[in-house]
Amino acid sequence: MQTKQTMKGFTLGALAAAVLIGLGGCGDMSRRNQDTAIGAGVGAVGGAVLTGGSGLGTVGGAAVGGVIGNQVGKGR
């Protein structure tokens, strides 16, 4: 059980690092596109956490987070 929990922590850490590195390329994006990308990243991490690292949960979370981020950026 300890190995599974360690692997889950490593996976989430790697995912968070990938999101942060990916956001470094957002410098020339519009604010709305940045909000969409940030929402997708946060949604992916949330989906992964809520579903125990399921790929489907991660992708689903990214899709929902991207839509929410896009709509939040709409008013700016």
Image (spheres, rainbow, N blue to C red):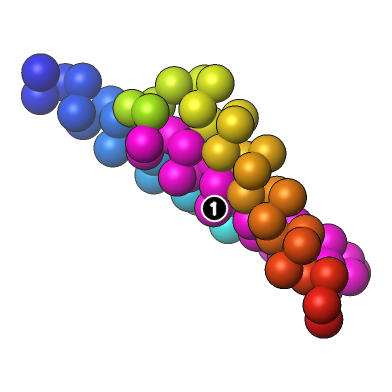
Is residue 75 in view from this perspective? yes
Q: Is residue 49 left or right of residue 34?
A: left
Magenta-colored stretch includes residue 19: no
**Residue at 82% from the left image edge and 77% from the top image edge:** 75
What number of labels is visible?
1
Viewer can see residue 10: no
First to last magenta residue range: 24-50
Nearest the viewer among 36 and 64 is 64
Disc 1 secondary structure class: helix
Residue highlighted by disc 1: 42
Q: Quadrant of the N terminus?
A: top left
Q: Quadrant of residue 59?
A: top right
Q: Position of residue 57 (x, y in %)?
A: 50, 27
Residue flagged by tag 1: what amino acid is it? Val
In the picture, measured across the screen, residue 27 lies left or right of residue 61, that is right
Label 1 neighbourhood size at 10 Å, few (<14), some (14-19), many (20+)?
many
Q: Image height check: is 15 above or below 36?
A: above
**Residue 14 occupies quadrant:** top left
Q: Residue at x 21, y 30 (%)?
A: 6
Q: Nearer the viewer, residue 3 or 74?
A: 74
Q: Position of residue 48 (x, y in %)?
A: 43, 34
Q: Would you say the magenta stretch is mainly helix, strand or loop?
A: helix
Q: Residue at x 54, y 21 (%)?
A: 56
Q: Position of residue 25 (x, y in %)?
A: 78, 59
Q: Quadrant of residue 9?
A: top left
Q: Is residue 1 above or below residue 25?
A: above
Q: Quadrant of the C terminus?
A: bottom right
- 47 falls in the magenta region: yes
